[in-house]
Image (spheres, rainbow, N blue to C red):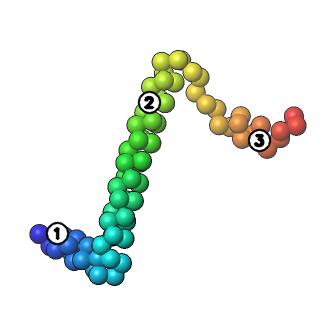
C-alpha cells in the first residue's frame, strides 16, 4: 500500500510543480517509450524467426571486424 501512496504523492508533486498539462504530456511520453520498446522486442523476435525460415547463415562478427579494420584488403 505504501508504494501506491508514494506514487500518488509523486504525481501530485509533478502537478504542483509543472502543472497538469505538462504532467500528462510526461505520462504520454513515457507510455510511448514503453510501447516502442515492446515493438522493438517484437521486431527482434520476427527477425530471428525470418532468419531461421530463410536458412540464413549465422553472422561471423570476427570477419566483420577484420574487414572494417582493413577495408583495402
Q: Is residue 14 visible?
A: no
- State which tag comes first along the sequence, 3 or 1: 1
Decide: is 45 above or below 31.
Answer: above
Name the residue carrying label 1.
4
Callout count: 3
Q: Seen from this angle, which residue lies furthest top?
A: 54
Q: Residue sitting at 44 percent across and 25 percent down?
A: 49
State the image coordinates of residue 63 (x, y, percent, origin top left): 71, 34
Judging depth in this view, the residue of 6 and 53 nearest the camera is 6
Relative depth, front residue between 35 and 3: 35
Residue extending farthest to the right is 72
Query: Marks 2 and 3, Cα distance to the nearest angstrom?
Result: 28 Å
As measured in the structure, the alpha-carbon distance from the residue carrying label 3 to the one carrying label 1 is 52 Å
Q: Which residue is mark 2?
A: 46
Evaluate whether residue 43 shows in this view: yes
Element carrying mark 2 = helix
Instruction: Decide which of 14, 52 is in the foreground and name it.
Output: 14
**On the picture, is 10 further left or further right than 71?**
left
**Crowding at label 1, few (<14), some or many (≥20) Cα neighbours within 10 Å?**
few
Foreground disc of the pair 2, 3: 2
Viewer-proximal residue among 35 and 72: 35
Labelled pair 1, 2 in contact (Cβ < 8 Å): no
Amino acid at each position: 500500500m505504501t508504494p501506491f501512496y508514494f506514487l500518488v504523492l509523486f504525481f501530485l508533486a509533478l502537478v504542483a510543480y509543472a502543472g497538469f498539462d505538462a504532467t500528462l504530456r510526461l505520462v504520454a511520453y513515457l507510455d510511448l517509450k514503453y510501447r516502442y520498446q515492446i515493438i522493438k522486442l517484437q521486431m527482434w523476435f520476427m527477425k530471428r524467426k525470418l532468419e531461421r525460415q530463410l536458412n540464413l547463415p549465422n553472422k561471423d562478427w570476427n570477419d566483420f571486424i577484420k574487414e572494417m579494420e582493413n577495408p583495402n584488403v
